Amino acid sequence: MNPIDSEIPVKRRSHGFTLVEMLVVIAIMSILMTAGAIGLGGLGGKGVTSGVASAESLFDEARATAIGKNMRACVLVAKALTNSPADDLRRIIVAYEEVDTVAASPTFGQAKDPNNAAPKWEISSRGAVLPDQTFYSTRLSKLDHEKGTGTIDTVASTRFVGATKAALTGDYYIYVFNSQGICTTPGASFIIGTGARNTSKKSTDQPPRVTAAGKRDFGGFVVWRNGRTSVFRSPDQMGTEMSSLSAGKDF
């Protein structure tokens, strides 16, 4: 037999995939994608999904700011804004503690008062606003999510450095990271949901309420000690109160 003829079949068998193999791979990919969709089903619509993603990025920003500047940083969630009630429970911003600006000071460029338990805060970014009809849940977000207890700490804009923009004046929920990027309230949760509220009034007077369409439209995450976050994969992970939510209920 001609040596060249004997090599040709070998080459053809050593390259490429058969049609059957390609169909098997496609089938496996389809099954995995379907399983993933089922696993995440009921965990928020587009507004909640994008809102959780935006919030996670801001928590990452706060952690990175704390480490980069070697000083405390925080995430602030608008609780009740004096001049912009439509942004209540929707506006989220990042800030870091007040910096010493006295050139002759030995701590120039560093935290002005690192031992102060109630420092002033400098706004570091424009932050973000949650999508329409999507609100931070004061009822479901807990200081200790595992135990389902505690409310997130609050801070007033009077603790902001310099003149505060009128649109940002008010009270905020606060999540703090120390100078090493460690969350000072490990296990705290951040949960948002779809609902409706009278945005001409403060959220303290007109909290968001569950709508029939958004009964299970919630999402969020837990903030761990190292500052990282873990997204909730099912409604049950967001707490026992989820089972009692019904149309018209405050959240």
Image (tube, helix red, strand yellow):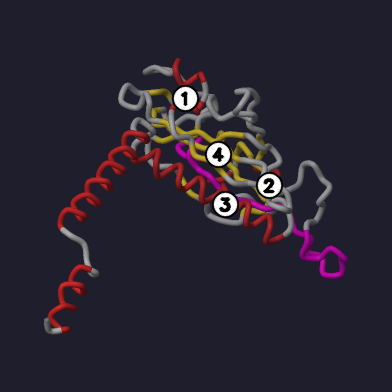
First in sequence: mark 3 or mark 1? Answer: 3
Q: Which mark is residue 114?
A: none
Q: Nearer the viewer, mark 4 or mark 3?
A: 3
Q: Is residue 125 above or below residue 146?
A: below
CA–CA distance between discs 3 and 1? Answer: 25 Å
Q: Residue at x 39, y 31 (%)?
A: 194
- Farthest residue in the front direction? 1
Question: 22 or 178: nearer the eye?
Answer: 22
Tell me if mark 2 has few (under 14), some (14-19) or many (20+) residues whose alpha carbon lies within 10 angstroms of its own.
many
Q: Which mark is residue 177?
A: 2
Q: Which residue is mark 1?
A: 236
Amino acid of disc 2? Phe
Magenta stretch in the rendered image: 82-110
Secondary structure type for disc 4: strand
Q: Nearer the viewer, mark 3 or mark 1?
A: 1
Secondary structure type for disc 3: helix
First in sequence: mark 3 or mark 2? Answer: 3
Q: Which mark is residue 60?
A: 3
Question: Viewed as shown, does residue 196 lie left or right of 146?
Answer: left
